[in-house]
């Protein structure tokens, strides 16, 4: 966020320095010099007149003063302006006082200089100089009066003549000149001050605008959105209507940004922002929360249908093609909706809830709008909590593998087992993979968990082999995400390496969706895994779209016929046909097949008769913890594959 207070402060400081220091020093130095020269000229003229009149003592006082004053330009050069002003004031004040004492006392023309000096001191000097001068002139005037009254001194007061008229004129001219200069400066300074003030105000307004608006779209930002919400909500409450808050997030905007560059992304946001702002009523607000997220406030909602109408309208606005340069872009958005006061009365709560509803809209396939729903919210919280717990689960050793034996239907021997993950949650008890695997996948935690599963399964398998079940193998479920992750083959190699298990005994169960992407990286990983002698099987075969061409070229892959077909094959002829087709297909391609979810003897027999080689299911055994599995193997010694 832009810290505009900080900016205003800096701006104010800048103006203050502009109005004071350097500039003002320069002007006042210049003024001081001008007044100095005017004074010098006046003193010379005065001295000449006094010499001409034969007033030698006052003339010499004037000359001395003139000489003393020549220190002023030097002091200015030394940057001692204050001292220079003080010198001017006091040299003149003393000179004038002397003149008065030696000549006409309070009747002397020099008395006129006093007010001039006081004005000058007040306008240029410091307070100290002014007070000192004030004391000096008052004391001198009073003393002069007292001494004259008491007769201690007698002043010679001739009638004014031409010379004194000229002297008075000279003094008045210099005073007028100095006052004119200084007051002019004051006026200019005031002018500048008011101009600067106006500029400062304008900048402050601009900064304030910036602090409350998004710079790209000029829409209100989050700070102003809060304000707008309070106004709109108050308005709705007065009218007894509701306020709808919509959290809008563009779908796949990141892809556009990444592939087309940020400039195009910015243009797109700008055009969308304008479109949204134009498409709504003036009483409604569109704000940009940041990135590709907008907040829309709609006032005076009478019922939910009206909100739906607005949401549809907004989606239509967003979906219209956007032209940028010569390209046309199509975007969609997901919208989360809350109603105030129904879903809450305070901005932060509503914002959070609308964000959650938006997330739900995304989860359910994007390009849709979702109203906030307390139940969904609880579920989401639950999921978030479960993901957080899952992060700890490996460290806390809460995971465990269950094993479900796989049987060779031909000779009824156990050839190995499928490792199935179980989670002993500290508070929720035993959890099955259907609950947590999707969350592990969506959060990316599956990569780490999958690595643990593979290593543990290999270790367990080797332990069994060392216990005498020498040909027992293990199959491990692998998520698409794990497989796609770079270096997956190394994870497999590492598990074999660390456990010491031979690759022949390990099989990876992947889903059909992986086979559809027949791309180079996948082929490389597959080749590397083959290199390790590790087997691959397609889990839940028949439920997705398989790439048959791919299977033909890779007939080492085992097919695991999905449980849903097996469990119904004896009662549903469609299912039976599918199972037969798969078995024929795999026989034709020279592939191996496993039937999963076999629950009774009749199914087992039917599968055997149809040519299925392996089976797995409750009919033989349910998945069981490792120890139990080991006992199971011991008690079925004669059925173990050797
Ligand atoms: P799946 O790979 O299809 O695993 C078979 C599931 O069917 C297991 O459920 C098993 O208990 C159940 N099952 C086995 N025989 C029968 C039967 O005769 N009848 C019925 N009704 N069910 C049977 P489970 O253990 O709950 O596993 C569910 C899914 O979780 C698995 O489906 C698998 O996709 C996934 N999963 C399990 N462990 C892992 C793992 O370590 N990693 C990954 N990525 N996924 C796993
Ligand atoms: Ca499986
Ligand atoms: Ca399966």
Image (cartoon, helix red, strand yellow):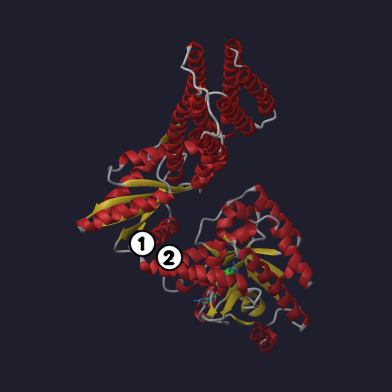
Q: Which mark is residue 574?
A: 2
Q: In the rendered image, which residue does mark 1 sit on?
A: 346
Q: Please state which of residues 181 and 213 is positioned toward the viewer in this rendering.
A: 181
Residue 611 quadrant: bottom right
Q: Is mark 1 within 8 Å of ligand 1?
A: no
Q: Please state which of residues 529 and 194 is positioned toward the viewer in this rendering.
A: 194
Q: In x, y percent, where is residue 598?
A: 53, 76
Along the horizontal axis of the image, is 69 left or right of 156?
right
Taking the spot 54% from the left edge, 56% from the top edge, the residue there is 546
For the residue carrying disc 2, how many other residues have a C-alpha within 10 Å: few (<14), some (14-19), or many (20+)? few
Residue 443 visible, this angle = yes
Q: In x, y percent, where is residue 11?
A: 52, 39
Residue 329 visible, this angle = no
Disc 2/disc 1 C-alpha distance (Å): 56 Å
For the residue carrying disc 1, how many other residues have a C-alpha within 10 Å: few (<14), some (14-19), or many (20+)? some
Taking the spot 38% from the left edge, 38% from the top edge, the residue there is 274
Q: In x, y percent, where is residue 302?
A: 21, 56
Q: Please state which of residues 34 and 618 is positioned toward the viewer in this rendering.
A: 34
Relative to 406, does residue 527 appear above or below in the rendering?
A: above
Q: Report helix, strand or loop for mark 2.
A: helix
Relative to 226, does residue 103 appear above or below in the rendering?
A: above
Q: Please state which of residues 179 and 1 is positioned toward the viewer in this rendering.
A: 179
Q: Earlier in the sequence, mark 2 or mark 1?
A: 1
Relative to 517, does residue 571 appear above or below in the rendering?
A: below
Farthest-out residue, left: 239
Tags 2 and 1 touching, CB below 8 Å: no
Q: Report helix, strand or loop for mark 1.
A: loop
Farthest-out residue, bottom: 635
Residue 585 quadrant: bottom right
Along the horizontal axis of the image, is 455 left or right of 623?
right
Q: In x, y percent, where is residue 224?
A: 39, 49
């Amino acid at each position: 966020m832009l810290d505009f207070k900080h900016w205003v402060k800096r701006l104010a400081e800048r103006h203050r320095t502009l109005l004071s220091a350097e500039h003002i020093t320069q002007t006042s130095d210049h003024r001081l010099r001008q007044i100095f020269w005017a004074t010098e000229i006046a003193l010379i003229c005065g001295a000449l007149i006094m010499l001409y009149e034969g007033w030698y003592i006052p003339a010499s006082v004037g000359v001395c003063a003139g000489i003393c004053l020549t220190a002023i330009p030097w002091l200015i050069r030394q940057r001692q302006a204050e001292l220079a002003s003080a010198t001017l004031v006091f040299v003149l004040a003393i000179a004038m006082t002397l003149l008065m004492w030696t000549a006409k006392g309070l009747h002397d023309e020099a008395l006129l200089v006093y007010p001039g000096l006081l004005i000058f001191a007040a306008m240029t000097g410091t307070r100290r100089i002014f007070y000192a001068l004030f004391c000096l002139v008052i004391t001198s005037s009073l003393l002069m009066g007292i001494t004259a009254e008491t007769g201690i001194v007698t002043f010679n007061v001739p009638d004014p003549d031409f010379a004194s008229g000229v002297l008075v004129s000279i003094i008045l001219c210099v005073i007028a000149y100095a006052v004119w200069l200084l007051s002019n400066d004051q006026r200019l300074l005031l002018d500048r001050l008011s101009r600067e003030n106006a500029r400062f105000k304008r900048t402050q307004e601009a900064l304030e605008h910036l602090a409350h608006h998004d710079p790209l779209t000029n829409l209100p930002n989050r700070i102003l959105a809060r304000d707008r919400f309070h106004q709109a909500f108050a308005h709705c409450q007065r009218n007894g209507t509701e306020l709808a808050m919509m959290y809008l997030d563009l779908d796949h905007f990141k892809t556009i940004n990444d592939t087309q560059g940020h400039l195009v992304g910015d243009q797109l946001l700008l055009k969308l922002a304008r479109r949204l702002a134009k498409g709504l009523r003036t009483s409604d607000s569109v704000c940009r929360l940041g990135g590709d997220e907008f907040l829309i406030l709609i006032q005076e909602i009478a019922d939910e249908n009206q909100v739906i109408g607005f949401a549809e309208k907004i989606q239509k606005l967003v979906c219209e093609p956007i032209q940028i340069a010569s390209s046309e872009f199509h975007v969609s958005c997901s919208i989360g909706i809350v109603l105030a006061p129904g879903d809450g009365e305070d901005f932060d709560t509503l914002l959070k809830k609308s964000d959650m509803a938006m997330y739900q809209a995304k989860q359910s396939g994007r390009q849709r709008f979702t109203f906030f729903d307390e139940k969904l919210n609880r579920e989401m919280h639950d999921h978030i909590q479960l993901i957080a717990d899952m992060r700890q689960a490996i460290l806390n050793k809460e995971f465990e593998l269950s094993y479900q034996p796989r049987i060779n239907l031909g000779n009824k021997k156990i050839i190995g087992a499928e490792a199935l993950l179980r989670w002993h949650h500290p508070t929720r008890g035993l959890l099955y993979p259907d609950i947590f695997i999707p969350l592990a996948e969506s959060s990316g935690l599956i990569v780490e968990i999958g690595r643990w599963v593979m290593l543990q399964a290999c270790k367990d398998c080797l332990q069994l082999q060392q216990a005498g079940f020498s040909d027992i193998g293990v199959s491990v479920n692998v998520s698409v995400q794990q497989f796609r992750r770079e270096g997956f083959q190394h994870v497999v190699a590492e598990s074999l390496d660390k456990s010491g298990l031979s690759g022949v005994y390990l099989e990876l169960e992947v889903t059909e969706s992986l086979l559809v992407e027949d791309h180079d990286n996948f082929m490389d990983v597959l080749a590397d895994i083959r290199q390790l002698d590790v087997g691959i099987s397609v889990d839940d075969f028949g439920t997705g779209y398989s790439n048959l061409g791919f299977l033909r070229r890779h007939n080492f892959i085992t097919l695991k016929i999905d449980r849903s077909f097996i469990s119904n094959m004896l009662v549903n002829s469609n299912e039976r046909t599918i199972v037969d087709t798969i078995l024929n297909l795999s026989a034709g391609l020279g592939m191996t097949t496993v039937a999963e979810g076999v629950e009774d003897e009749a199914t087992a027999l039917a599968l055997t008769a149809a040519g299925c080689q392996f089976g797995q299911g409750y009919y033989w055994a349910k998945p069981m913890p490792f120890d139990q599995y080991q006992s199971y193997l011991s008690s079925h010694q004669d059925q173990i594959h050797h």
